[in-house]
């Protein structure tokens, strides 16, 4: 038992060591990738569930790594967040997203994911306003997707609240991402300048197979409506998903049933073809 215990410790240290090395390498590579311009945005349509009309697009970042190929955001956003590189990366994402949206016919909006560390960085509100002005995009065509943890964290609450208010007053809309997965203490929401919630894919995944999950989703959507929030359901993959969500009074949706995330040029074609 003693030797196996020791062995475990060694193996544990080895994997920990490898993991730390991997993270350091990834951190260095990320830093370099920002300088080298290895990031791209893809855009996924958000549609009205009843008519299928495209209302906007969510911007999603991709890292085109020279040797690893396309790295999905879940493999690097966490490291970017921990290391602080998310501030630079997030500024690039924001500026690129609003520049793309400036080419789309109004009122098509772009939704940009903002991580808590990026929002907390000094000057975020000013950055958003400059990005909109530089791109010539009206504020009401930008949605910022934030997480419950930003609203419910234990620091800076007054400052965050007043910055959200300032953004909201300027016309920018605020969405709560991954709605339902976090604290789900809904009482805070009615006093926040929030316009939409994005119902997490994990809920949508289960509605066709579990009546009790479907009831839960109906309840969450009903609650959001009581708080005068519109609902965007994520991860809609089947026609059954769409029908059930319409039955639950969900207005908007996003998912592979409608379209996968696409390159900027394709998004432009998509939205101009839809309008004609
Ligand atoms: P999210 O904000 O919840 O984004 C939705 C994710 O679901 C995207 O994954 C999208 O490609 C995927 N998705 C959409 N429809 C479907 C579907 O029907 N089926 C399935 N299986 N998946 C679907 P993606 O692009 O890999 O992004 C993962 C997460 O990475 C995002 O989750 C978001 O939290 C984060 N992320 C992506 N881009 C950015 C960014 O620019 N900044 C920040 N801070 N985070 C980002
Ligand atoms: Ca999102
Ligand atoms: Ca999600
Ligand atoms: Ca499903």
Image: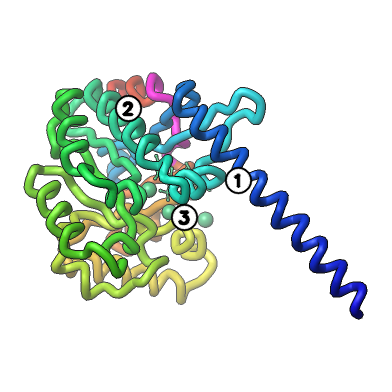
What span is colored magenta in the figure? 258-266
Mark whose residue sits in front, 3 or 2? 2
Q: Which mark is residue 240?
A: 3
Instruction: List the residue tagged with mark 1.
Output: 23
The Cα–Cα distance between marks 2 and 1, rounded to whole angstroms, is 27 Å
Secondary structure of residue under mark 1:
helix
Secondary structure of residue under mark 2:
helix
Q: Is residue 222 one of those drawn in magenta?
A: no
Report which quarter residue 213 is drawn in. bottom left
Q: Point out residue 85 in the picture as x, y percentages from the top left corner.
A: 42, 40
Q: Residue furthest bottom?
A: 1
Secondary structure of residue under mark 3:
helix
The Cα–Cα distance between marks 3 and 2, rounded to whole angstroms, is 35 Å
Q: Point out residue 165 in the picture as x, y percentages from the top left corner.
A: 11, 54
What residue sits 70% from the left and 57% below the top? 16
Label 3 C-beta lies within 8 Å of the nearest ligand 4 atom: yes
Residue 92 as seen in the image, left or right of residue 124 = right
Instruction: List the residue tagged with mark 2.
Output: 96
Tell me, yes or no, whether the two marked residues, 3 and 2, touch with CB atoms within 8 Å.
Answer: no
Q: Nearer the viewer, residue 24 or 161?
A: 24
Badge 1 density bin: few <14, some 14–19, many ≥20, Cα 10 Å: some
The Cα–Cα distance between marks 1 and 3, rounded to whole angstroms, is 41 Å
Residue 33 in view here: yes
2 or 1: tag closer to the N-terminus: 1
What residue sits 45% from the left and 59% below the top? 204
Badge 2 density bin: few <14, some 14–19, many ≥20, Cα 10 Å: some
The quarter of the rendered structure image containing the C terminus is top left
3 or 2: tag closer to the N-terminus: 2
Q: Which mark is residue 171?
A: none
């Amino acid at each position: 038992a003693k030797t196996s215990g020791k062995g475990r410790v060694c193996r544990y240290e080895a994997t920990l060591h490898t993991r730390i090395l991997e993270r350091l390498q990834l951190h260095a590579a990320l830093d370099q990738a920002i300088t080298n311009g290895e990031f791209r945005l893809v855009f996924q349509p958000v549609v009205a569930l009843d008519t299928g009309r495209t209302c906007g697009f969510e911007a999603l970042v991709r890292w085109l790594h020279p040797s690893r190929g396309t790295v999905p955001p879940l493999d690097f956003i966490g490291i970017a967040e921990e290391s602080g590189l998310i501030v630079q990366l997030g500024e690039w994402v924001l500026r690129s997203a609003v520049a793309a949206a400036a080419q789309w016919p109004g009122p098509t909006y772009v939704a940009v994911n903002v991580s808590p560390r990026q929002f907390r960085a000094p000057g975020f509100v000013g950055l958003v306003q400059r990005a909109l002005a530089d791109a010539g995009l009206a504020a009401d065509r930008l949605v910022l997707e934030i997480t419950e943890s930003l609203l419910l964290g234990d620091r800076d609450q007054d400052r965050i609240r007043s910055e959200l208010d300032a953004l909201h007053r300027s016309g920018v809309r605020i969405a709560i991402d991954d709605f339902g997965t976090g604290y789900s203490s809904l009482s805070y929401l009615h006093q926040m300048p929030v316009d939409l919630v994005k119902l997490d894919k994990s809920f949508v995944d289960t509605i066709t197979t579990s009546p009790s999950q479907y009831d839960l989703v109906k309840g969450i959507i009903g609650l959001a409506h009581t708080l005068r929030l519109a609902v965007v359901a994520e991860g809609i993959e089947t026609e059954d998903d769409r029908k059930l969500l319409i039955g639950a009074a969900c207005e908007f949706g996003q998912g592979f049933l409608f379209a996968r995330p696409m390159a900027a040029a394709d998004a432009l074609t998509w939205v101009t073809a839809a309008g004609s």
